[in-house]
Amino acid sequence: MIKRFVNYCLDVRDRQRINIALTKGAAMMHARTIDLTRPATWEFSGFSQNGEDGILDVLRRQLRSSNRYFIEIGAADGIDNNTAWLVIAEKYNGLMIEGTPRLVERAMRTIVGYSVGAECHNMFVTMENAKYLKSIALHHDPDVFSLDIDGNDYYIARAILEAGLRPKIFVVEYNSVYGPEKSMTIRYQQDFVFTEAHPTQLYYGVSIAGWRHFFQSSGYRFVTVDRNGVNAFFVDPQFFEEQFLSSVKGLDYAENRFQYRKYRRPSQDQFSLISDQEFVSI
């Protein structure tokens, strides 16, 4: 009985969050003055933590063909992520993957009902089981693939492409602590949890230079990072007009504003706090 009451309270709050996100997102979306050459003008946030909803909105509109399908690894409770706007506002189909059971339960109660083709799966994705996603995905070339797990992101992205998935738009979290030039990531640990890996919670993820090297070698083009220094956007050029891609003047790097506010020092000084950890060059 207590659990049912707690779930009821959470569901009421989540419905309120959804209504606020839709209202905020719609207002910000229509307040933009979009310049297709400047991704900073594309940004708006409805459900996304930063301007990802807006960047994805513009990139999706530039696709030569669309299957209106997404995959997100690290979908949290289904609301604070990069694909909730696609499900709720755009009625996209797709997979939300999350490793925390209680968050998946909340997402299944509130989010999946907004689109008949939306699914939420409880799965802690590793390099070893990532190929399973191909067997449950309805499209192997989703319009959008978002990856944000604060840890083994590089190894999972590599496993995803090796498994035969080929997203048109690939959104990945980068860690600005490495700065704009270091091409590196953490050592792979199957059960990695960034909140337990180091007391600073700075030892996680991939540098922006590492992502650019990886995706360029995989045939993708870099577009931009968001202005808050959290996510980077890459696209498969075969699905976009060359004139559009060549004209985009994206932001190459930005400091993570949360980490900068927390530590009151730039990335090179933040990195000194974890420089004794084990890293892998990309």
Image (spheres, rainbow, N blue to C red):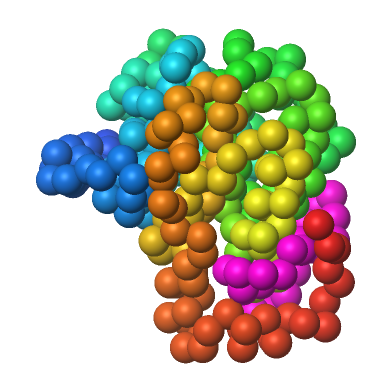
Residue 164 lies within the magenta run? no
In the image, residue 137 above or below residue 211? above
Q: Is residue 36 left or right of residue 188?
A: left
Q: Is residue 260 visible?
A: yes
In the image, residue 259 above or below residue 164? below
Quarter occupied by residue 140: top right
Q: Quadrant of the C terminus?
A: bottom right
Q: Nearer the viewer, residue 57 or 242?
A: 242
Pinpoint residue 228: horizontal percent, then vertical percent: 41, 63
- For image coordinates 30% across by 45% down, the residue present is 42
- For image coordinates 69% across by 86% down, the residue present is 273
How many dots with numbers?
Answer: 0
Q: Is residue 156 visible?
A: no
Q: Is residue 133 left or right of residue 174?
A: right
Q: Quadrant of the N terminus?
A: top left
Pinpoint residue 9: horizontal percent, then vertical percent: 32, 43
Residue segment shown in magenta: 176-201
Q: Is residue 119 left or right of residue 206?
A: left
The secondary structure that most of the magenta stretch takes on is loop
- For image coordinates 45% across by 25% down, the residue present is 241
